[in-house]
Image (cartoon, rainbow, N blue to C red):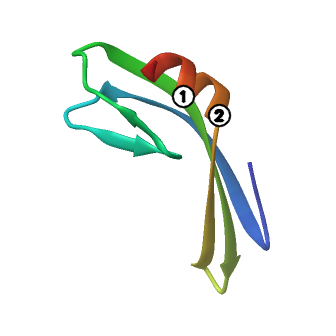
Amino acid sequence: MAHDGGCVCRSILTGTLAKLWNLGGTVVEPRGQRVSFGILDVMTCREGLIVRKEVWLDGRAMTAALM
């Protein structure tokens, strides 16, 4: 979705955790499983350029996939 002042992009991140990850005070160890969760990028555009980008993650799905 896009408009004059910005754009929103929804995607799915899929991968395999390769090393220890400190996730909000909890250390997640790699177990070799593939994980997948949603990401929403919200970008503010001005004169055809991205001037700000915010990334929103589905934290509940991310935690469930990693634990």
Q: Position of residue 45 (x, y in %)?
A: 67, 76
Give the residue pinned by disc 2.
58
Q: Position of residue 31 (x, y in %)?
A: 25, 16
Along the viewing direction, whichever of 48 and 53 lies nearer the viewer: 53
Image height of 67 relative to 45, above or below: above
Q: Quadrant of residue 44?
A: bottom right
Q: Residues within 10 Å of mark 2 (few under 14, many from 20)?
A: few
Q: Residue at the spot x=66%, y=27% of the render?
A: 60
Tell me the amino acid under the disc marked 2.
Asp
Which label is found at residue 31? none
Q: Does residue 50 appear to the left or right of 67 in the view shown? A: right
Which label is found at residue 62? 1
Along the viewing direction, whichever of 45 and 31 lies nearer the viewer: 31
Q: Does residue 44 appear to the left or right of 17 in the view shown? A: right
Q: Residue at the spot x=43%, y=22% of the render?
A: 66
Along the viewing direction, whichever of 59 and 26 lies nearer the viewer: 26
Q: Residue at the spot x=65%, y=86% of the render?
A: 47
